[in-house]
Image (cartoon, rainbow, N blue to C red):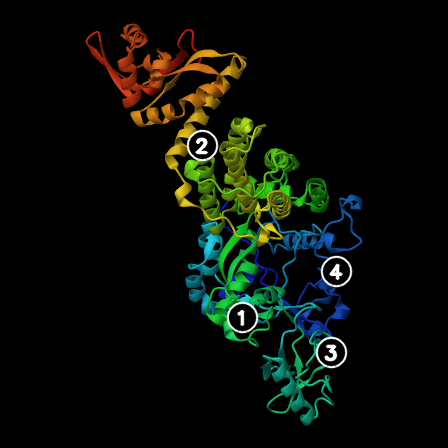
């Protein structure tokens, strides 16, 4: 529970504890090791220092040898010991932190000690508890640029926007100085040299500056010679440049001289590897050793993408360094990816056995179906529940449908020797069904182009899939098969070929960013058949541009109504097992206004042909196609109208159609029963809709 109370504070073993201790003047408990260094009581392996590892004078003056000796050399937690295994541990194998707690309680030095279960950080590789440890570090004063970082962040297009204003924005608002140094062996060396007393220091900013400082050191006698003797700074070849070693241990052999003549050794720490990542825009082109106009061509980046966890990693370091170095953003647009979880929503882990091997998955399904599934199943910034069946569905439903449509075209194009030798028939002269699919195609081009430009690949992929599955394959090709069969190459047949080819080659170009390999193969196969384009790859062809003159929204609306009406009628046929080949006499379609009625009339013959019905009638509303009755809810109405409930229930039962419409429209209706007014709401009744006898609705 949250609230007031007492908590143990250890300033040397927790960032928050250290901050609180500093605020209230509670110092950390430090010990002096045999090398004269100030250290906490626990070493980097998680155990108390042995007495022989401590400074003898410090032991004599500041250590209760008898008491400390009981615990010296023991691990704070048994898990830190390499030989400890949970499955072989004994109940009496208590850890040092428990033994210390018991000792403090026995000596009446602890107010209260209790056991309780709580969250605690563990190493994600070893599952061992994390021990926070204080170290001296070098920091970048990032807080000095905090306001500017916030300003520049507001100019970045974040996907989703909530990450930029929320997670990343809040991180910047609560910005702390950047802990730059790391106590490791391999990495970028911290370019700071200091005298032994720490009073003089130099931060080296370039290879040239380091070379000049080494020359001073040789002249002062603190170094015998420059390590890169004979190489100089103007190495013409990469081979010569590679002879200059700036990593450990070589860089630590360089001793410089201070302004007062004292030897200076490099600080032993390395630079945070995230600094390397954040410096990428500059380091990749050896900036500032290239012309500014050349650098401006690649900086800032138009687009980057990484996991949402990088708000405190790469996204931040890029932004921070760019702000401090160039007073600019490092990237204009960013997609913050969500996590890939297993199909049950759990984080994938080799240890848990729910991780998916990407290489075997690609071998089985192909990289394009995998990519298509991941992009169209969820927006990149949302977490994805990864399911193998989804990849198979994408391969079958989208890629299979597109390939079947392509195969249909190629089959008849080869039979008819269709090539690009015929003049293009103007769209206005083509049949209505061709003009409709081309209008829909160019509307798709607009939608997909906008989606890609605004970093919404999921919208683009889903729109393309809908076009291919619902409109191109299931509607256009199915309704126009006969136009490709037999006969001479008349204008109607040529129009069908040219229309379907334009749809296929345009779709192939639209999917290229998501399915680069499949689209390239299909594009080359298509163009080799027709000879219409000579590019060696779809990725060298121009991206489609929508032709506004071809787009006819009214025609699209009419065909949508035809598809919707046909789909509903066919579903009703399936509901009662009436096959399409059995003709029906009549269908009734409710319309809301004359505009909708005229739109359906424009495609009436298509609907009747598709569903095998002889006549189509219109009704003014769905109410004319249903029989409605109203049942009172006695549990709600009874307590309110007890004495008149029987008469009220009868009034509700025989309610006229007009009163039902009034109730549904206004949400309530008033009755007068036995001289008393009764207000009935929609919550007080149940409205039941039933089919007209002899009809299926």
Per the rendering, the mark at residue 243 is 3
State if disc 1 and disc 4 touch (CB < 8 Å).
no
Of the two numbered discs 4 and 2 on the same chain, state the one appearing first in sequence.
Answer: 4
Per the rendering, the mark at residue 431 is 2
Residue at disc 3, secondary structure = loop
Picture coordinates of residue 313 (x, y %)? Answer: 57, 59
Q: CA distance from mark 2 to mark 1?
A: 69 Å
Depth check, mark 2 against mark 1: the one in front is 2
Q: From the image, tell me which residue sits under label 1.
A: 140
Q: Is residue 655 left or right of residue 157?
A: left
State if disc 4 and disc 3 touch (CB < 8 Å).
no
Residue drawn at x 46%, y 21% as measured from the top left: 568
Q: Is residue 423 above or below residue 252?
A: above
Depth check, mark 3 against mark 1: the one in front is 3
Nearer to the camera, 79 or 627: 627
Q: From the image, tell me which residue sits under label 4.
A: 70
Picture coordinates of residue 630 (x, y %)? Answer: 35, 12
Q: CA distance from mark 3 to mark 2?
A: 73 Å
Depth check, mark 4 against mark 1: the one in front is 1
């Amino acid at each position: 529970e949250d609230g007031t109370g007492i908590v143990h504070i250890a300033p040397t073993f927790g960032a928050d504890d250290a901050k609180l201790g500093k605020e209230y003047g509670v110092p950390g408990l430090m010990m002096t090791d045999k090398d004269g260094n100030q250290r906490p009581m626990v070493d980097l392996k998680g155990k108390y220092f042995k007495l022989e590892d401590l400074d003898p004078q410090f032991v004599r003056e500041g250590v209760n040898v008898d008491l400390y000796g009981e615990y010296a050399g023991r691990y704070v937690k048994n898990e830190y010991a390499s030989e400890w295994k949970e499955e072989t541990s004994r109940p009496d194998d208590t850890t040092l932190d428990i033994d210390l707690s018991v000792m403090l309680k026995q000596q009446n030095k602890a107010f209260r000690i209790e056991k309780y279960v709580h969250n605690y950080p563990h190493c994600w590789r070893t599952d061992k508890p994390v021990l926070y440890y204080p170290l001296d570090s070098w920091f970048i004063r990032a807080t000095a640029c905090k306001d500017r970082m916030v300003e520049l962040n507001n100019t970045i297009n974040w996907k989703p926007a909530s990450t930029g204003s929320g997670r990343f924005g809040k991180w910047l608002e609560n910005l702390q100085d950047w802990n730059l140094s790391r106590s490791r062996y391999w990495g970028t060396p911290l370019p700071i040299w200091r005298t032994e007393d720490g009073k003089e220091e130099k931060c080296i900013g370039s290879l040239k500056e380091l070379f000049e400082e080494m020359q001073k050191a040789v002249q002062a006698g603190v170094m015998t010679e420059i390590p890169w003797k004979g190489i100089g700074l103007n190495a013409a070849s990469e081979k010569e440049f590679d002879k200059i070693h700036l990593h450990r241990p070589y860089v630590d052999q360089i001793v410089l001289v201070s302004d007062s003549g004292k030897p200076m050794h490099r600080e032993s720490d390395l630079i945070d590897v995230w600094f390397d990542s954040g410096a990428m825009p500059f380091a990749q082109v050896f900036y500032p050793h290239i012309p500014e106009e050349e650098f401006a061509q690649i900086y800032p980046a138009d687009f980057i993408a990484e996991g949402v966890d990088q708000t405190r990693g790469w996204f931040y370091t890029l932004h921070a360094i760019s702000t401090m170095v160039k007073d600019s953003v490092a990237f204009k647009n960013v997609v913050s990816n969500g996590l890939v979880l297993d199909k049950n929503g759990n984080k994938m882990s080799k240890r848990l056995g729910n991780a998916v091997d990407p290489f075997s998955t690609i071998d089985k399904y192909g990289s394009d179906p995998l990519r298509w599934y991941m992009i169209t199943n969820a927006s990149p910034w949302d977490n994805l529940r990864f399911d193998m069946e989804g990849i198979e569905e994408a391969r079958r439903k989208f890629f299979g449908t597109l390939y079947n449509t392509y195969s249909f075209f190629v089959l008849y194009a080869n039979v008819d020797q269709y090539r690009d030798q015929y003049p293009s028939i103007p769209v206005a002269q083509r049949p209505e069904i061709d003009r409709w699919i081309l209008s829909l195609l160019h509307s798709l081009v607009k939608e997909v182009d906008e989606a890609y430009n605004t970093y919404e690949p999921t919208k683009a992929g889903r729109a393309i899939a809908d076009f291919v599955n619902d409109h191109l394959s299931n509607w256009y090709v199915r309704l126009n098969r006969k136009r490709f069969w037999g006969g001479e190459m008349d204008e109607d047949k040529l129009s069908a070929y040219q229309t379907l080819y334009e749809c296929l080659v345009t779709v192939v170009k639209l999917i290229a960013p998501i399915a680069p390999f499949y689209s390239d193969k299909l594009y080359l196969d298509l163009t080799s058949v027709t000879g219409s384009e000579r590019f060696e790859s779809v990725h060298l062809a121009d991206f489609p541009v929508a032709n506004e003159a071809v787009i006819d929204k009214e025609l699209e609306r009419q065909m949508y109504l035809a598809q919707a009406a046909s789909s509903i009628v066919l579903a009703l046929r399936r509901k009662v097992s009436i096959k399409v080949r059995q003709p029906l006499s009549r269908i009734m379609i409710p319309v809301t206004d004359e505009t909708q009625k005229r739109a359906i009339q424009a495609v009436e013959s298509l609907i009747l042909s598709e569903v095998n019905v002889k006549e189509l009638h219109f009704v003014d509303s769905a109410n004319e196609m249903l029989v409605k009755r109203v049942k009172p809810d006695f549990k709600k109405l009874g307590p309110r109208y007890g004495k008149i409930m029987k008469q009220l229930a009868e009034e509700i039962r025989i309610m006229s159609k007009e009163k039902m419409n009034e109730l549904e429209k206004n949400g309530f209706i008033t009755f007068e029963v036995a001289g008393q007014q009764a207000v009935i709401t929609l919550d007080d009744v149940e409205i039941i809709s039933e089919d007209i006898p002899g009809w299926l609705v």
